[in-house]
Amino acid sequence: MVLISIIITLLYLVLIGSFVIGFDKVPVFKLKDIKAKTTFSVIIPFRNEAENLPHLLASIDALAYPNHLYEIIFVDDESDDESVDIIMRFLTNVRNDIKVISNKRVSNSPKKDAITTAISQARNDWIITTDADCILPKYWLDSFDECIQTTTSKCIVAPVTFHAKSGFLNRFQLLDMLSLQGATIGGFGIKKPFLCNGANFAYQKALFIELNGFDGNKNIASGDDIFLLEKAVKKHPKNLNYLKCEQAIVTTNAQPNWKALKAQRIRWAAKTSAYNNLFGKLTGVMVFLMNALIMSLLPWVLLYVFGIKIFIYLLIIKFSIDYLLIFKSATFFNQKQVLSTYVFGFLLYPFFSVYIAFVSLFKGYKWKGRDSKK
């Protein structure tokens, strides 16, 4: 048992350590005030987002990018609240390159259908997806434009974080998000991209068509981002970039309660079995094994079957390498204040993650008011 525990911990150390090293290999992208020329179609699927849309719309109105170079396509997925009315009222006061269309359902994935529907009507060269509960920074499109003009990108993954709010639940989720973003950036740094977030994801319209869109995973409700990235990695591994730019950071809301968080994480876990990226699968397995190891060893330590000193050493290793990755991520996102909750989050996370992994094997989830199966 001791040998197995040491092997798992060392492998975990190497894995997260590689993300720490990779994080610094992705250079920070600085805007140089290049003349804008890229045309974008921004796609925003929504369902019952009346509470969040005013904030998103205000951030859209504040975008600095030239109006004639982008369009906004909102895709209504059968909302039964005031979402559409809120957008239409907004449209009466702005230019006419923003429109609302209805989702055309053809698969088990409403969001993939919404994006596909919008792309079929998009008139511009580049697609950017985001969510209705997000806030976009002023120079968001400028960041993508300069990245496109100065690289050979066909697909760009960009940063996402949660709004920093008080309360342990929000801070717990923010720590986890920073960890995920750290792994995302680190993966790009070691030339093993395997994560992205559809709340800030861009790709050429031609690439989407070349990859046959979401064909092959339409039976899975979520994953509009990860599965498309997997296809892009296989087809054009040298044309993928992470936009590590402060002006490109999109902020969104953490889940409001533990029940909603549980449903979200079960949804995330449900799609992992369909991953085709071997490195992504190995990373998921390694992280699960490390968390399961900590949780399973605890009763043996309390019963004096497993040495407490060895257990403490394993904890210190995991604590330190996790903290280093999150610290780097928190520094980039300017959210280092959340680190004050790190100790409590670190103690809770193994139990939470193992529980979610177990429950996801047997239970479906609810997403946007709809029941979904794995």
Image (cartoon, grey):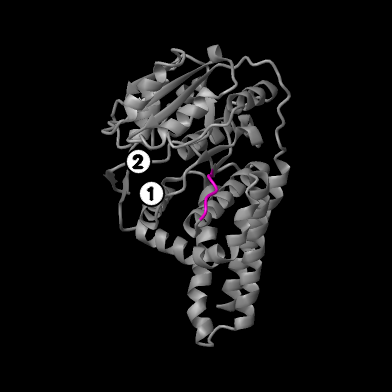
The quarter of the picture where the N terminus appears is: bottom right
| Residue 196 located left or right of residue 364 | right
Q: Position of residue 71 (x, y in %)?
A: 48, 17
Q: Position of residue 214 (x, y in %)?
A: 41, 32
Q: What residue is shown with label 1? A: 267
Residue type pointed to by label 1: Arg
| Lower position in the chain sequence, tag 1 or tag 2 | 2
Residue type pointed to by label 2: Ala
* Discs 1, 2 touching: Cβ within 8 Å: yes
Q: Is 369 inside the magenta-drawn segment?
A: no
Q: What residue is shown with label 2? A: 221
| Residue 281 located left or right of residue 121 | right
Residue in the image at 28% along x and 29% along y: 105
Give the SS element for disc 1: helix
What is the magenta range?
162-166
- Above or below: residue 194 compared with residue 336: above
Residue in the image at 56% along x and 83% along y: 306
Residue in the image at 62% along x and 57% along y: 339
| Residue 252 located left or right of residue 100 | right
Q: Looking at the image, which is closer to me, 173 or 106?
A: 173
Instruction: Compute the Cα span from label 1 to label 2.
Output: 8 Å
Q: Looking at the image, which is closer to me, 63 or 121?
A: 63
| Residue 173 located left or right of residue 193 | left
Q: Looking at the image, which is closer to me, 65 or 283?
A: 65
